[in-house]
Amino acid sequence: MFKKFAMAAVTAAMPFAAHAATVTVSEFEIGAYDTLTAGYVIENFETGYTNGQQGPITSSLVGTFSSTGGTGSGTTCAASPEGAASADKKTCNHLVVWDKDINGQGNLVPDGGSWSLNSNDTTGILWDVDIGKMFTSLVIAVQDAADQNATLEIKVDGNDEASITSLSSGAARTILIDFGVAVSSAKIKLVNANGKTNDAIAIDGAAVGVVPLPAAAWLLIAGLGGLFALRRRQTA
C-alpha cells in the first residue's frame, strides 16, 4: 500500500473551466505503482530510445519532456558521456535517456527493466501532456529527488502545488496528480526550488489516466450540454 508523504490542493487548466485537483506524493513500491496505473497509458522509456539520447524527449504515448534549465554541475553530469568529455561539464544542459543506472539513478518500472529519463543535473524536468486525448490523472515515478539540500517543487500549470525535501540518496517516490475531471492538457514541472544544478532526478513510468471515450466524444458531450443549458434558459 502507499504511505502518504504529502498532499496539497491544486488548480489545473481544464478544457472549459478550472477545477480543483489533488497532488499526492507517496513512497514508491512497484506493486502499488502497478495497481495504481492499471489501464493507464505508460511511458517507461524502454523502447524507441538510444543510450545517452539527449535533448527534449517526445513520446507519442504521453507527450514531451524537456529540461527546466541550467547547466549540470554535479556528479550525475560528470558520470554522463557529455560530462565526462568536458572537464568543465558545460555540455550537460539537456535531459538524457539512460540504459541502466547513472550515479545510482535508473529504472523504476517495469520491474526488471533498464531505461529511465534523467534531468542530467539541470534544474528539473517539464512534462507537457497533450496527446489528443482527455485524461483525469497522471502518475510519475521519481528517484533521487531532493537529496543534496534541494527542495523539489511540483508545479501544475505554473502553480506551486507540493514539494519534496530532505530525502535520502536513491529514495523513490510516486507522484499522483488527480484532476477530478477530464482535462485535455497539462504542464507538470518537477524543479529544484533553489536552482541547484547538482541534484539530478530520474523519472520513469510517466502514466496518463486516459478516459475511455475519445477526446472528440468528450468535446461533443460538452458542446451538447452547453446547448441544452442555453435552450433551458431561453425556454425559461
Image (spheres, grey):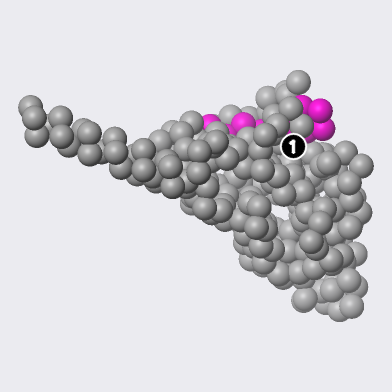
Looking at the image, residue 172 sits to the left or right of residue 100; the answer is: left
Between 103 and 165, the one lying in front of the other is: 103
Is 35 left, or right, of 169 in this rendering? left
From the top left corner, tell me how far across and down residue 131 is, in percent: 56, 53
Q: Which residues are magenta?
A: 21-33
In magenta stretch: residue 177 = no
Tell me what residue is drawn at x 61 percent, y 56 percent.
63
Evaluate whether residue 53 shows in this view: yes
Locate residue 137: give its quadrant: top right
Give yes or no for residue 23 being in the magenta stretch: yes
Q: Which residue is found at the position 73% from the left and 23% from the top? A: 3
Answer whether residue 121 is visible to the viewer in this image. no
Label 1 environment density (alpha carbons within 10 Å; few <14, some 14–19, many ≥20): many
The one nearer the camera, 93 or 211, is 211
What is the x, y in percent for residue 38? Answer: 70, 32
Name the kind of residue labelled 1 in the image: Arg
Work out whether 88 lies above or below 39.
Answer: below
Where is residue 153 drawn, in percent x and y? 61, 46
> Viewer-proximal residue, 67 or 137?
137
Whether residue 136 sits left or right of residue 34 in the image: it is left
Q: Residue at x 84, y 66 (%)?
A: 50
The quadrant the N terminus occupies is: top right
What residue is at 7 percent from the left and 27 percent from the top? 236
- Say which element carries label 1: strand
Residue highlighted by disc 1:
173
- Picture coordinates of residue 47 (x, y %)? 81, 56
